[in-house]
Image (spheres, rainbow, N blue to C red):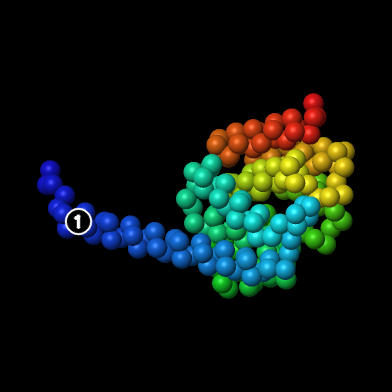
């Protein structure tokens, strides 16, 4: 077998660096886009945290806990609330980021024309039929949300409402089982910590 030359090693290193730079560039473009779209929004916690913290946390969880390096998934995670919660349109997302990313965002976007109770039921039904990549985003999104519900909930959420959210989140994530063992385990651990923190059984 012919040994690999140093030239081949150098070329491989250069290609990898280019790929890394491009991934970083595209992901930062998604972060910048989401930050602009969410610029006037705050989370509903007592601290009124900047909304952009949430989608960044979702993407970070997918990468760190889920060990996922799929660029389209990470970009869609950062962008996942732009259509649902800002004036961003699906066409705008597709024009900027392409159909692969915009389709993923569409999969995890609720239909805001439905009443809230119906949207919650539909999310439980729809999650089970999502693609593998969309389920990764859903897993991380719900994990971040239950952590917030336990430790920094909206000011007007009493214990009953927080329990109801945790129960509903479990039903949603039932449709994601078998997707990513790391993310599912982390969801379960976060859920248990939330239950313990709220003194629930």
Vertical side of 20 occupied by 132: above or below: above
Q: Residue at x 55, y 47 (%)?
A: 62
Instruction: Tell me: 138 left or right of 120.
Output: left
| Residue 175 seen in the figure | no
Q: Residue at x 84, y 50 (%)?
A: 155
Vertical side of 128 occupied by 196: above or below: above
Vertical side of 171 occupied by 37: above or below: below
Residue 186: % across, % down: 60, 36
Determine the secondary structure under disc 1.
Answer: helix
- Report which residue position mark 1 lands on: 8
Vertical side of 70 occupied by 25: above or below: below
| Residue 183 seen in the figure | yes
Figure quadrant of residue 56: bottom right
- Is 130 or 37 nearer to us in this picture? 37
10 Å crowding of disc 1: few (<14), some (14-19), many (20+)? few
The single residue placed furthest to the top in the displayed view is: 201
Residue 16: % across, % down: 33, 57
Q: Residue at x 81, y 46 (%)?
A: 121
Residue 139: % across, % down: 64, 44
Figure quadrant of residue 103: bottom right
The single residue placed furthest to the left in the displayed view is: 2
Assign the N terminus to one quadrant of the image: top left
């Amino acid at each position: 077998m012919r040994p690999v030359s140093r030239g081949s090693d150098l070329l491989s290193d250069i290609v990898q660096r280019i790929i890394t730079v491009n991934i970083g560039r595209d992901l930062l473009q998604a972060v910048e886009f989401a930050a602009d779209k969410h610029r006037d929004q705050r989370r509903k916690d007592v601290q009124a945290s900047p909304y952009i913290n949430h989608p960044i946390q979702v993407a970070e969880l997918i990468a760190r806990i889920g060990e996922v390096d799929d660029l389209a998934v990470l970009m869609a995670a950062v962008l996942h609330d732009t259509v649902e919660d800002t004036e961003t349109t699906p066409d705008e997302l597709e024009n900027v980021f392409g159909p692969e990313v915009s389709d993923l965002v569409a999969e995890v976007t609720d239909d805001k024309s439905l009443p809230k109770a119906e949207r919650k039921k539909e999310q439980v039904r729809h999650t089970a039929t999502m693609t593998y990549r969309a389920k990764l985003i859903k897993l991380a999104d719900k994990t971040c949300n239950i952590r917030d519900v336990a430790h920094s909930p909206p000011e007007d959420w009493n214990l009953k409402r927080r329990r109801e959210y945790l129960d509903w989140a479990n039903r949603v994530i039932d449709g994601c089982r078998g997707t990513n063992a790391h993310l599912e385990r982390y969801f379960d651990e976060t859920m248990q910590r939330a239950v313990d923190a709220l003194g629930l059984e």
